Image (cartoon, coloured by chain):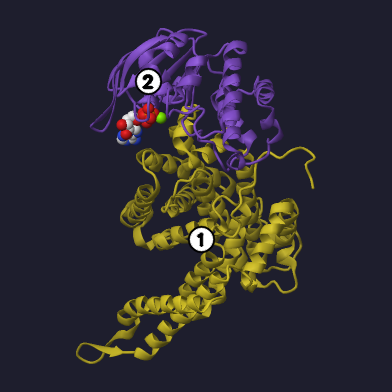
């Protein structure tokens, strides 16, 4: 590496520092504190100094790294190994991962906290896979995916609390509702692409949330819906003391009562739902409509001249993506037993999009890795409370620096030569 | 079979076609030559329904198609190989072909159709599982033609198949076009800047200048036409 490069990198990092200063100066540096009769500004230049210094240093290291044109950091080694594995032996990796997921609840170190995190990660994996249909396969950047998650959750909650039907009846209904909303959103945005589409879908997400807040008679407004029925094990509730005439899970199987039973059941439930999403996506990619999604993402004009109907193709992508979002929403509702509009803010959409993009647009395994990485890191810093979003941002930056096309950028062909195994 | 009368197409306020009259009969190879910007691609896109004609009629087998959606037009039997090939570069060769069969994928004849394409362009068969983007220009052109054939068109519209392709491969592609016409009974409407090749191949031909047809006649006649020789065949023109 030449001296010139180093000077160049250094200049560049100083410039980064300047930007950081402009941002952190007012945001962090000037802190308002209320004392007695009004607000006072207390400067905290020390913290600003620290943050700006970190930015300069980070930028400088990144520059050094990319100037050498090699990625010999621990992180990139780690992920490129992953890429190699999934390229060649995708199946083995998938089977191992699923086996691990299946035995996970019974591993010795698995406690309640791990289970909760795992359920959360699986929910995001499912949402990521659902959105992957829209963003990864069909190439329609949807920033309002949380709307379908919300529609699914609310439909589930309303149907379940009103009619008292079981989970397995409410789930498909909620999915259908969400799919319907997917089509509803699909129509106005058919002609939009790229940034315009992103903005409109973002707006749609907010509209749904605002409706949920204001349509008091139905959604109970900001207070949300409580008392959503908990799932039962094929009719056997997870209760310590079941109601008259009911037999609960632990009695039926002659077990000591434990709240873990329900948690484990929820874990397997979301695992199965997520795997269904994945299986469905893998299958549909090989069908004409799935192939048309991928083709449409690449070249709409070519598609038209070949007889692909872009309207139907896009609408099915929106509808099916939304349906899986709705399923995930149902799960969320039954798990929490309480939902309110607060759970469906834009940040959720952003996280899901981040998972898809960072996973490598269209890669199913990438979604898994990105979910584990992003949600896992954010969880690890839970004690830091509001600062954990910094960890989230940091994780995104790390991926973009070392894997700019996503963790697994390569699309696997749906057609492989028979017996073409090297 | 395909009759175009007085078609005018606009891009916003810019008029690209200024009343084009042209027809293609069943079983023919018809060529349309013209320099860059004459409106050739616009005409094909208008026939395919991707661009809409503001005025004029396009009649295919007795039916007006100027207001039809593009996919309906493909269903009716007109398929286009667009300029610049527009291969789906991340999809494999076979996936590209399957996409071409999209309009036609009731599945029944698929195996047979794809075999015919592989027979026509054996190199595609060797590259089945390779991504479209990794093919050479000539191979991509073959793939684009094969992909369009998968929709079982009655008329194949070809937009500058020789564009950016090595001369040796251009010959091979033109031979294939002839075969498609003679053996598969597909009517060909070929648009080219490579006037010599296009006229040699054509039964009949048209010259498009500035969005209007200026000369028409038999391919062989136009080859001998003085004006055409000066404007399109001699000197700087390719091949
Ligand atoms: N998308 C477009 N927007 C505006 N003008 C266009 C567009 N496409 C083509 N044109 C104009 O229309 C005319 C005909 O273009 P085209 O059909 O591509 O010609 P050719 O295929 O004969 O080279 C040209 O003047 C070109 O600049
Ligand atoms: Mg052109």
Of residue B104 and residue A176, the one placed in the foreground of this image is: B104
Position of B148 relative to A11 (above/below): above
Residue that label 2 marks: B230
Q: Ligand 1: which quarter?
A: top left
Query: Quadrant location of the N terminus of chain B?
Result: top left
Query: What chain is the yellow one?
Result: A
Residue A375: which quarter of the image?
A: bottom right
Of residue B113 and residue A240, the one placed in the foreground of this image is: B113
Residue B195: which quarter of the image?
A: top left
Chain B pictured colour? purple
Position of B90 relative to A221 (above/below): above
Establish whether ligand 1 lies closer than 8 Å to the Cβ of label 2: no
Residue that label 1 marks: A337
Q: Please tell me whether mark 1 sits on a helix, a strand or a loop.
A: loop
Q: Tell me the residue at 35%/52% (across/down).
A: A199
Q: Chain of mark 1?
A: A
């Amino acid at each position: 590496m030449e001296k010139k490069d180093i000077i160049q990198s250094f200049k560049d990092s100083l410039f980064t520092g300047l930007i950081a200063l402009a941002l952190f100066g007012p945001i962090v540096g000037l802190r308002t504190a209320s004392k007695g009769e009004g607000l006072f500004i207390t400067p905290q230049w020390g913290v600003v100094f620290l943050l700006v210094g970190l930015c300069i240093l980070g930028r400088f290291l990144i520059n050094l790294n990319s100037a050498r044109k090699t990625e010999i950091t621990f992180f990139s080694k780690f992920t490129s190994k992953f890429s190699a594995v999934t390229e060649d032996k995708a199946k083995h990796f998938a089977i191992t991962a699923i086996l691990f997921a299946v035995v996970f609840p019974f591993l010795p170190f698995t406690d309640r906290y791990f289970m909760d995190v795992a359920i959360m990660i699986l929910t995001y994996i499912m949402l990521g896979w659902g959105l992957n249909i829209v963003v990864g396969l069909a190439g329609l950047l949807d920033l309002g995916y949380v709307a379908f998650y919300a529609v699914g959750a609310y439909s589930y909650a309303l149907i379940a609390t009103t009619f008292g039907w079981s989970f397995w009846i409410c789930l498909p209904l909620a999915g259908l509702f969400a799919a319907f909303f997917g089509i509803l959103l699909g129509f106005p945005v058919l002609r939009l692409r790229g940034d315009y589409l992103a903005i409109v879908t973002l707006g749609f997400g907010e509209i749904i949330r605002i409706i949920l807040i204001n349509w008091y008679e139905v959604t109970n407004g900001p207070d949300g819906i409580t008392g959503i029925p908990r799932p039962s094990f094929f009719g056997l509730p997870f209760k310590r003391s079941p109601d008259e005439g009911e037999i609960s899970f632990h009695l039926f199987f002659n077990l000591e009562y434990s709240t873990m039973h329900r948690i484990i059941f929820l874990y397997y439930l979301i695992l199965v739902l997520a795997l269904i999403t994945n299986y469905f996506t893998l299958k549909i990619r090989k069908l004409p409509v799935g192939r048309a999604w991928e083709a449409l993402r690449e070249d709409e004009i070519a598609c038209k001249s070949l007889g692909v109907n872009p309207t139907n193709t896009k609408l099915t992508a929106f509808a099916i993506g939304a349906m899986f979002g709705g399923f995930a929403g149902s799960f969320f509702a039954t798990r929490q037993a309480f939902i309110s509009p607060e759970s469906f803010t834009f940040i959720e959409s952003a996280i899901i999009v981040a998972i898809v993009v960072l996973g490598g647009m269209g890669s199913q395994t990438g979604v898994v890795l990105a979910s584990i990485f992003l949600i896992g890191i954010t969880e690890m810093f839970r004690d830091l409370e509001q600062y954990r979003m910094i960890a989230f941002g940091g994780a995104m930056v790390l991926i973009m620096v070392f894997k700019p096309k996503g963790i697994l950028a390569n699309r696997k062909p749906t057609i492989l030569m028979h017996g073409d195994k090297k | 079979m395909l009759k175009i009368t007085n078609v005018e197409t606009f891009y916003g306020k810019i008029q690209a076609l200024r009343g084009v009259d042209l027809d293609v009969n069943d079983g023919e190879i018809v060529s349309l030559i013209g320099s860059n910007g004459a409106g050739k691609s616009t005409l094909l896109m208008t026939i395919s329904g991707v661009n809409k004609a503001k005025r004029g009629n396009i009649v295919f087998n007795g039916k007006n198609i100027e207001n039809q959606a593009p996919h309906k037009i493909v269903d009716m039997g007109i398929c286009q190989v667009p300029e610049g090939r527009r291969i789906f570069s991340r999809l494999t060769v076979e996936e590209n072909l399957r996409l071409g069969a999209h309009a036609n994928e009731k599945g029944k004849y698929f195996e047979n159709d794809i075999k015919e394409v592989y027979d026509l362009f054996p190199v595609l068969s060797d590259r089945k599982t390779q991504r479209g983007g990794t093919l050479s220009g000539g191979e991509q052109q073959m793939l684009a033609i094969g992909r369009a054939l998968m929709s079982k068109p009655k008329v194949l519209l070809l937009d500058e198949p020789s564009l950016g392709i090595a001369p040796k491969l251009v010959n091979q592609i033109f031979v294939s076009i002839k075969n498609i016409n003679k053996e598969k009974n597909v009517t060909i409407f070929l648009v080219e800047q490579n006037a010599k090749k296009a006229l040699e191949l054509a039964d009949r031909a048209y010259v498009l200048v500035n969005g209007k047809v200026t000369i028409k006649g038999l391919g062989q006649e136009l080859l001998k036409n003085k004006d055409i020789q000066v404007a399109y065949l001699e000197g700087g023109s390719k091949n």
